Image (spheres, rainbow, N blue to C red):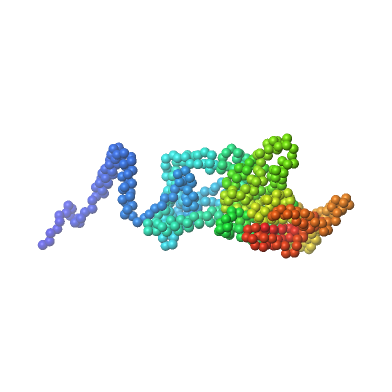
Amino acid sequence: MFWRPKTMFPGSSATQMPSAKTMISAAASAAATIVLFRSIVKEYLPSEFRRYIFYKLKTLINSFSSEFTLVIEEYDNLNQNNLFKAAELYLESIIPPDAKKLKISLIKKESNFSFSLDRNQEIVDPFNGVTLKWKFISKQGPRKYIPSPNNFNSIPNYEDKFFELSFHKKHRDMVIDVYLKHVIKKSKETKEEKKSLKLFTLTPDRMSGRRGDVWQSVNLHHPATFDTLAMDMEGKRVIMEDLERFVQRREFYRRVGKAWKRGYLLFGPPGTGKSSLIAAIANYLNFDIYDLELTDLRTNSDLRSLLISTENKSVLVVEDIDCSIELQDRLAQARAMMPSRHYLAYDQVNQYQVTLSGLLNFVDGLWSSCGDERIIIFTTNHKERLDPALLRPGRMDVHIHMSYCTPCGFKLLASNYLGFTEHPLFPCVEALIEKARVTPAEVGEQLLRYEEPESALTGLIEFLEDKSERLKREDGNKDSNGESGTAEGKLAQELDGNNGEVVKKELDESTGEVVKKEEGAQEPDGESGEIVKEEGRSRGAMVKIQ
């Protein structure tokens, strides 16, 4: 005989689940109890004690968990957290294609969209067999003031943004020592891929004291590249190899104790492509350009402040350096030439100007080390007007002579403008270019005047013939007046920029330019001490690495 438990209803099972009404009633009672308990705690316990209790409870719960979390806030006190920006860029590169919700934005003056996580979204990132989980959190917080972009005043902020990076606690050392370095490296690569080249110039109101506003920028869309430059191939090859060598030698510069920078001097007649070469260098290296106008500065301190405010991986350009500042005559020489009664007036006029010593300190002094991977380019139409102290290696390491158009340069211009590299009229054009002193800008302007290639070449030939005839008449007038004498064998004396000695150079019969040096002339490299040859030709681009 078996015993069976009594049931309330016939046919019911031995164990009966509580009804839905009973469950709802119990949940409501529990919620009411919790609310009542919180009210009592909030009213009778001090806030410090409540926070302590909650902290202890959270610590107790976390002690049973194997998960470890790093919190990366947007601001560290009032300073922007660079790791937060790096995490933003890194996560943008690993967003999975099946993501359901993302934020998209287009920053002012940029052409590329930016994607980022929406609040409370998560991304799982497997790394070296370890699963890491990123979560973006944004919540309202107490008002706090953070520095504005111009560092002049502060702006209120009511939102706290941070990333939570969670992983197993046994991988803590690996994440800190290896993974975060990987994040920073990848974020830099993403930043370079997204980068739009900028052209910076001085702002008109920079004297107001707002440090962040000294530069204003526009996107640089200059199309010049080394493929389109009307230069001899050998000259372009030397320049590109020098640039590549420079950007790859960070550790070398640190080891020898030199600032990681390179100085270039572009000199030659107007219209020979100096500005185009600067744009080609920026496009080749993917460096921003800072156009520095020295005549807009009042003191050497202004010059130093501008140098500090420029970014790494940039090209600093000072155009027409011989016209920007009195570099040839030192202050002592100027005072010696002026009557004593003019000393005060001279000082009053020049006390708010950038001096040669200030410029030299900017190029090669202690302040030049405030930044890495910089190219400093000076341009001039008259190299002979520059002070020898500015021309020496370490300040202007590479001298590039941008001269008149050559047959090789013409063929490249014809390819760019007309779309072909061979034509029956080319020999005639090349013969005339050898005689006429025309710049690439003049040739390009002639090729732009006509849509039909035959007309463009015919017009260019007429222009070159007229130019050659004018040059012959001018040279004939000079010879008849006895102003120049016979140019053949004429020697020019020039001050050597390295040692201040007077050197002799032979001049061209028709142009008056230096065309001949001793065969195989060699000079020591200013950076490594190696012997290098002067590259290029007298017509076109002549590259001299000091």
Above or below, 466 relative to 147 = below
**Residue 28 visible to an observer of this rendering:** no
In the visual, does 202 lie left or right of 504? left
Q: Position of residue 198 (x, y in %)?
A: 60, 49
Between 320 and 117, the one nearer to me in the picture: 320
Single out the residue that lies furthest toward the right. Answer: 480
Residue 402: x %, y % from top left: 72, 55
Residue found at the very far left of the displayed protein: 1
The answer to whether 373 is drawn above or below residue 350 in the figure is: below
- Name the one closer to the observer, 55 or 41: 55
Residue drawn at x 47%, y 43% is 78
Q: In the rendering, at what x and y percent does residue 20 appear? A: 26, 49
Q: Which part of the image, by quadrant, shows the C terminus?
A: bottom right
Up-down: is 285 above or below 357? below
**Which residue is at 45% across, 46% downward?**
76
Instruction: Specify whether 112 is left or right of 482.
Output: left
Q: Which corner quadrant holds the N terminus?
A: bottom left
